[in-house]
């Protein structure tokens, strides 16, 4: 019998490789405003704390004033709404992992810092084959990760003790979320950040491929 009864997933960088579409959207905004654009890999360090934070980090430091940040964020959101499905795909091994977790009767949920409406659209497009008990993005009035508020809400929906739930994510923010809510933190090394950040932020284990998660069950 599995020692864990559920897995809560981060979305970007864990279930789905969304980096190209995010980078293309933000670079379009930067270029249209005469600002330097960034290599796609640099966006690995911009994502994870919501799109407004991404827009802020992508702007040149001398232009990070409230008015420019608001404009860049709003325009980035418009661009991303146009192209969020252009290059995004599940990571290799994710469909098989979700199949096996489902077969084992493990409950599934998603907690993202992506805007809630977009989170729902992306999950419906790429992950509708599998049943998720809860899918939450960033919602008005609910603090984003690493605050545990939304994670605790998911734990209540799952009706499973926190220590019986794995939280799988690819960033320090995810590992802190797991720790803050009492879940078992597992870091995904195929995502956007390195092992050092994950371990320093509380990961109990880091894994190189999705299939390795099954050894925890």
Image (cartoon, rainbow, N blue to C red):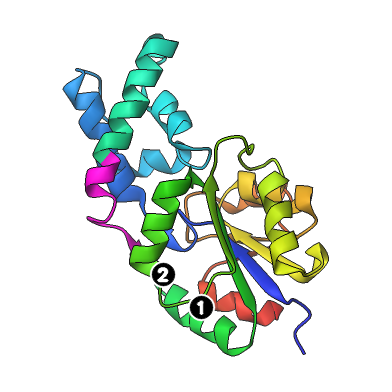
Mark earlier in primary sequence (1, 2)? 1
Q: Which mark is residue 127?
A: 2
> Does the CB distance between marks 1 and 2 fall below 8 Å?
yes
Q: Which residues are magenta?
A: 80-89
Residue 8 drawn at (x, y percent):
62, 64
Q: Is residue 17 visible?
A: no
Q: Is residue 141 visible?
A: yes
Alpha carbon of mark 1 to alpha carbon of mark 2: how far?
9 Å
Tell me which residue sits at (60%, 53%) in the image.
Answer: 195
Picture quarter with the C terminus? bottom right
Which quadrant is the N terminus positioned in?
bottom right
Q: Which residue corresponds to mark 1?
A: 98
**Residue 183 rendering spot, x and y as whole percentages:** 76, 60
Badge 2 crowding class, 10 Å Cα cut-off, few under 14, some 14 to 19, many 20 or more, is some
205 vs 17, left or right, is: right
Question: How many neighbours does mark 1 have within 10 angstroms: few (below 14), some (14-19), or many (20 or more)?
Answer: many
Q: Residue at x 25, y 57 (%)?
A: 87
Location of residue 68 (image quadrant): top left
Closer-to-camera residue (174/106): 106
Disc assigned to residue 27: none
């Amino acid at each position: 019998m599995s020692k864990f009864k559920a897995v809560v997933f981060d979305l970007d960088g864990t279930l789905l490789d969304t980096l190209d579409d995010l980078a293309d959207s933000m670079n379009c905004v930067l270029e249209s405003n005469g600002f330097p654009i960034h290599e796609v890999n640099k966006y690995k360090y911009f994502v994870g704390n919501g799109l407004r934070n991404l827009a802020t980090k992508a702007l040149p430091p001398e232009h990070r004033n409230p008015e420019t940040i608001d404009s860049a964020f709003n325009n980035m959101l418009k661009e991303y709404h146009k192209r969020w499905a252009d290059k995004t795909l599940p990571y290799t091994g994710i469909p098989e992992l979700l199949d096996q977790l489902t077969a084992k009767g493990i409950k599934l949920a998603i907690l993202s810092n992506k805007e809630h409406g977009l989170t729902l659209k992306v999950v419906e497009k790429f992950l509708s084959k599998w049943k998720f008990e809860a899918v939450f993005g960033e919602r008005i009035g609910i603090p984003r990760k690493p605050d545990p508020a939304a994670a605790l809400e998911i734990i209540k929906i799952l009706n499973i003790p926190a220590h019986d739930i794995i939280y799988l994510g690819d960033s320090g923010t995810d590992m802190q979320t797991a720790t803050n809510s009492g879940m078992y933190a597992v870091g995904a090394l195929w995502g956007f950040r390195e092992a050092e950040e994950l371990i320093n932020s509380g990961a109990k284990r880091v894994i190189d491929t999705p299939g390795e998660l099954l050894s925890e069950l």
